[in-house]
Image (cartoon, rainbow, N blue to C red):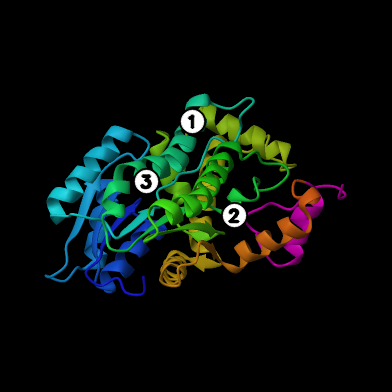
Amino acid sequence: MEEFSEKLAVVTGGGTGMGRELVRQLVASGAHVAMCDVLATNMAETVRLAQADAGQRISAHLCDVSDEQQMLRFRDEVVEEHEARCVDLLFNNAGIGGGGEFATGDRDEWERTFNVCWYGVYYGCRAFIDLVVAAPEAHIINTSSINGFWASIGTDIPHTSYAAAKFAVKGFTEALITDLRLHAPHVKCSVVMPGHIGTSIAINSSIVQGRGSALEMSAEDVAQIRDRLSATGQPVDNVPDQHIREMMHQRAIDFRDDAPTSAAQAATLILDGVRREQWRILVGEDAHSVDRLAREYPEEAYERSFVERMHQGGHFGGLVPPVNGPSS
């Protein structure tokens, strides 16, 4: 699909980050857009920034993608508001972080992350598949992550829920390639594998998980973070709780502002990949680097030496912490 003009695009997680930039660039390309998010104020800002022309429709819908009934309602609203007989582009983009610890962590947080990141994609495809197939040509774009082929953010930080969900998204989307080729050959699909992108996912995830901002963390949450930081060798035993809150808040801001790839750049790379009908879209030089390293050194992927190789390549220095002690 080389041109998006007059196409109808559905974007989940359109309130911030890559979702917002996808909406903006799709509208600028002449597409009509229906987006959903759980934060209405964020979507209102996306609409303002997109500044749709009078001839284009842009609609915003409150929807929790981890709830199938809400996704079906979202689909019905899209059909009604856009008078739609088909959907040309489906971007299952919504995602949150959290739920790193499986053995000792909070089950509700773990499942909340998994449900948004995996079931949000699955329910999106289920809800819209008939409308997608009804289009003369269409494209499904599912957002995974580099954590869909490397289930880690370092040897000292558990990352189980997000990584498990992103592996599921990658496998599902790759399996769809053959399924669609056999049963709906006019529908293409792509899996998006972003590296470190400058988004507000760290800030928004805390809100969606029910904790509010990092500055509002409970004493229990602070204690868990203190234990996690101590386990990585950081001297935080005597650091006041409020300082830890402020530190985590700043880290979330730095994650957004100091990323090597902006959300706008990521959206451009994704849309260029869709135009070229790439089934696999790596976003960012860091994503290409980790992909190469995981293929070249698969047995090292979860060892300290692998993190060192990433840092030597100039990637993830501020995101994946340096390891302590000698390489294994």
Tag 2–tag 3 contact (CB < 8 Å): no
Task: Please tell me the numbered disc located at residue 12.
Answer: none
Task: Answer above or below: position of 114 versus 183.
Answer: above
Is 161 placed left or right of 89 in the picture?
Answer: right
Query: Cα distance, mark 2 to mark 3?
Result: 21 Å
Task: Please tell me the numbered disc located at residue 146.
Answer: 2
Local secondary structure at mark 3: helix
The single residue placed furthest to the front in the displayed view is 182
Which label's residue is closer to the chain start, 2 or 3? 3
Between circles 2 and 3, the one closer to the viewer is 3
Q: Looking at the image, which residue is at 42% across and 34% down?
A: 211
The N terminus appears in which quarter of the rendering? bottom left
Q: Which residues are magenta?
A: 303-328
Task: Please tell me the numbered disc located at residue 111.
Answer: 1
Query: Cα distance, mark 1 to mark 3?
Result: 20 Å
Residue 4 x, y percent position in the rendering: 30, 70
Kindly identify the amino acid type of the residue bearing the numbered disc 2: Ile
Q: Is residue 81 visible?
A: yes
